[in-house]
Amino acid sequence: MMPTSTLGFEHVRQEFMLMQPAGCYWITTHRAEDARALGRQAIAAQQSLTLISVGEAPGDYLTPPLPSGPDRIALWSLPDSRKALINLHEDFRRALPHKSGVILFITPVSLWEKLSAAEKSAWIKKIHAWLISQQSTLLIITWGANTNNLRNHLQGTFRQLDGLAHLEWQQDCWDYRIHWWSSEQHLVADRSLPLVWEADRFRQPDNTRQAEPLTQDDAHRYLAHQQVLEGAPPLSTHWALYPDNDDLAQHAQQASSATVIFCLSHNAQIQALAADIHSLRRNRGSGLKIVVREMQTSLRYSDERLLLACGVNVIVPHSATLSRFLTTLEGVQGQVYQRHVPQDLDALLKGLQPMQEKGFQPLETFCRSVMLLVNNPLLPENDKGLLVALRPVPELSTGQALSLCKPRRFGDLVTLVDDRLYLFLSSCRLNDLNTALKFIFRLPHDEIFSNRLVWHDDQQILSEMRQLRDRAPSVWQEAPAAPASAQPQPAIEAARRIPHPLTLGGSPAKANP
């Protein structure tokens, strides 16, 4: 029997990383560098290996030299084409020997997008049958921004896949989420492990989770900003009210399991509030219940993501009544915060609020800023913003239309390309587009522009940015010139320009001969 293979993690239980012979395992990740690091670690942990890569030469994964691994590695380079992927199992049948050990297949997610859902399922079934007949192990590592869609499809292939996992970068560590993973004697599912990168390999840190609070004596206490009760006195002796968020955060540093309620009245408070919440969550642990009540409409959904990433249990919107707010407080009792909070707040702010520009930008700067934001793995997939192309009505020049454009918030950029305005509205949803344009332009936008195109999908935005950056033709084609026969004749044009003098109240004046 073939020896059981491993992913090569350090300080991780064996059942979370062992791979059985005749098994097919799949790991996804958003970043190419994470796929490369994971692949090199897997190579170093094998005794025999066949390495297949798409896009990048397989030999590049062996540079710099690995500290351990097989003496000889078979290197395959697969073309980035639908036909090559579909016929891969036939290539295996012809070229790979029986019991060929571990086959490592590293591929971008764009290759799998060339197959339909039915073709992907059929591909997995064929590969699974071949692995059983050959007693070989296949490990597929797929990277790219759209791996969520692929992973959702793979959830339905439990009978053919022996393991499915996802490696997620979290600024100062990685979260390794196991959907299911089976070896010869174990099956684990729905597990999450924090990992760090040390000595050229992933390992599980010693303090994998924050310790639970040693005492629950203050679980019944409420520490709150006095405005969240809308002028009402403390509801009981368990309530303590404070005049501002800074004072509240200072007293909350002594709590272990209390409910801490911050007040948010203006968008300018977001960064300071995020710092207070981040400090509390990192210092006081997962037992603290942290609530933010919005007193006036001030939160964009990008701000909500930031506060949640800093450690908030729940955000109560401005529209919620006092009774609904109190009901929400009852709902968070007994909760234990489970999400990872990165240690570096600045990195978190940069990752979740990466664009600090606004207004007009040169085309090169515009393209670079938009592409950096869309490629940010910390922001939600296909929900990073809108790219809008606007063509002014014939009566307006692009310069005049630009003078009417006044972006007010960071992340809203505008540039000029030929006779069109390109707008990127960061953290704007499609159903909010008309509202956003109403605030950006001084005049009704329907009267200023004759054409409008909108892109909201990440790949569509990136494709359009590459075209703009490379100065490729736009999706709008210039109207063809009128044929010569349709052009006004010079004599007719001259006649149109001759004035005809008229005498009001009398007969027409005669022109001088």
Image (cartoon, rainbow, N blue to C red):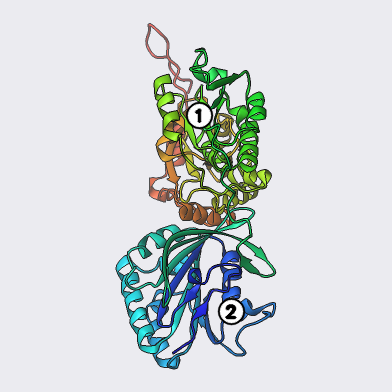
> Does residue 505 appear left or right of residue 38 in this picture?
left
Q: Secondary structure at mark 1?
A: loop
Q: CA distance from mark 2 to mark 1?
A: 51 Å
Q: Position of residue 91 (x, y in %)?
A: 41, 87
Element type where label 2 sits in the image: loop
Question: Where residue 41 sits: x, y (%)?
Answer: 60, 74
Residue at x-position 67% and y-position 78%: 63
Question: What type is the residue that disc 1 sits on?
Answer: His
Dot 2 or dot 1: first in sequence order is: 2
Q: Return the residue nearer the eye: 19 or 254.
A: 254
Q: Amino acid at mark 2?
A: Ala
What residue is rendered at 38% in x and 83% in y? 131
Q: Are marks 2 and 1 in contact (CB under 8 Å)?
A: no
User: How many numbered marks have been drawn onto this rendered protein structure?
Assistant: 2
Q: According to the image, label 1 marks what residue?
A: 220
The furthest residue to the top: 505
Near mark 1 (Cα within 10 A), the count class, few <14, some 14-19 or many ≥20, is few
Percent position of residue 129, x then y: 33, 82
Q: Nearer the viewer, residue 44 or 378?
A: 44
Give the number of the mark in front: 2 or 1: 1
Residue 116, how many percent across, how many down? 33, 67
Kindly identify which numbered label has been placed on residue 340.
Answer: none
Depth check, front residue: 35 or 220: 220
Q: Residues within 10 Å of mark 2 (few under 14, many from 20)?
A: some
Circle 2 sits on which residue? 45
Q: Is residue 375 above or below residue 10?
A: above
Work out whether 301 lies above or below 89: above
Q: Residue at x 62, y 32 (%)?
A: 273
